[in-house]
Image (cartoon, grey):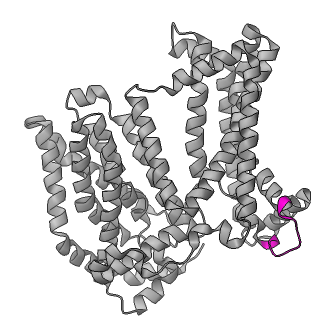
Amino acid sequence: MLFTFLNHQWLGFWRSRGKGGSIALQIAMGILILYILACALIAGLAFEELIRKFFPGKDVASVFNGAILYYFGIEFLMRLQLQELPTLSIVPYLHLNIPKNKLVTFLNVRALFSAFNILPVFLFFPFCATYIHAANGVFTELFFMLSIFSLTIFNNYLALYVKRLSTASTVFVFSGLFFLLSFGTLEYLKVFSISDLSNRLFAQLAIHPAIGTIFPILAFMMFQINASYLKNNLYVEGLSRGEKKKSATDYPFLNKFGEAGTLAALEIKLILRNKRSKSTASKGLLFILYGFLFYKKELINNDEFGMMLFAATFMTGNMILLYGQFMFGWQSAEFDGLMASKISIKNFIKSKFLLFTISSTVLTLIISLYGLISWKILLVQFTAYFYSIGIASVLVLYFATRNYKYIDLSKGSSFNWQGVGASSMLMSLPVFLLPFVIYIPVSYFFSPYLGLAGVAVFGVAGFFSRSFWVDFLVKEFNKRKYQIAEGFRERS
């Protein structure tokens, strides 16, 4: 039965109407994956030399052991963004007399066909076969390989399970983000070290190889948890759980904004119900971890806020940038109906501003946890917040009036270039550069704190003059609405 399902997938690919574009995409993806695997193999063969070069004086085995859990932690985050859920492939079989166990087995086996599951073999196994084999013998080498492979399988099913749970509950998403941010803060403050934990664990495995049996058990348990969840939710509503209907009163706090609030509520539902918009929004949430890369102690101590402001602008406004770059393409399928309705274009534009303000406020509250590192970070982040809601949102909506690309909401955002045009690509330049036009000269001639104050005042001025910008954007929209509508009718 498993091979029958796989054969159906193969036939479905070749019989699809857009197979020409799919083949070209698969070839391009295949070349990219082969290149990545080749690089991983070269790195794996040269692991010992690379460690000696970049970590002189440190024990090779300790550095390697310390890197293993780091790798799988980063890989897990990448899987959440790039690994697709294969659930829709079994929808045509749900009404047939096929045992649930066979459908679940097919889904679990198909989930193994991922480049993520091959990469650790090319990256870690050569080091195990050379250095660990020479230092500890073949028995330890095999258990290291078993442990790494088991962690790969564990990550595979954990990522799928988490993605399914996050589809079912937005509370789970925010709880997970809070956990990741708290964990990252502890790592940054050196209260807890993943590298140290990883080194201790695998150092013990080198001494007592039998410890490696823990990892296959964990992988099997994760497989069973994932299979059990699938079996209990193996129906169309369960496979697309996040798409249940909600009434307009689901977001009562938006009612006080009138028609603009109603339109913003509808857009929130659009984000949560459709694959492309949901994956774009969830991808933006991962960028709140950027602070750990840019908030360096030497920058904080020396009041060098330039790079920190760049990161803060992206973190507080990533929803504006990532989601906003495709305005008004999210409504491209219903755009003609929108233009023919009684909806006020002014309220339509206001709803976009309202959505951007809500998203930036939520993101700013989440990343305020970085304030545990230093109060100066809060100054930078609130400066970026005022800039995002006051200026960046205006720039994004202005460029949106020049984006005529149709967007298919049913497709994911990973490796999907649909809707990306010149205006959306150029948009990020002024959004990121404009704060520095104010910050750099003011901080140079006066002080970094006055530079931040200048950017914040600029943003606050933009926020309080929003009615002017709404009227301006309505005029720009009306100039081009027929071009936008014509562009949305072209479906490629």
Q: Position of residue 114 (x, y in %)?
A: 72, 47
| Rendered image quadrant of residue 234 | bottom right
| Residue shown at the point (61%, 68%) measured from the top left | 241
Q: In this view, does 97 lie above or below 213?
A: below
Percent across and percent down for residue 42 are 67, 25
Snapshot quadrant of residue 481: bottom left
* Magenta stretch in the rendered image: 92-101
User: Toward which corner of the image does residue 262 lie, by quadrant?
Assistant: bottom left
Residue 404 visible within the image:
no
Report the quarter where the N terminus lies.
Answer: bottom right
* 490 in magenta: no
User: Percent position (x, y) of residue 133?
Assistant: 76, 13
User: Residue at position x 74%, y 46% from top?
Assistant: 223
Q: In this view, does 166 lie to the left or right of 396?
A: right
For the C terminus, the image quarter is: bottom right
Q: Residue at x 62, y 58 (%)?
A: 164
Q: In this view, does 310 lie to the left or right of 235?
A: left
Q: Residue at x 88, y 61 (%)?
A: 7
Which residue in the rendered view is the most extreme toward the left? 446
Task: Using residue 186 as the reference point, say whether residue 41 is left or right of it.
Answer: right
State whether residue 97 is above or below residue 337: above
Secondary structure mostly taken by the magenta-highlighted segment of the chain: loop
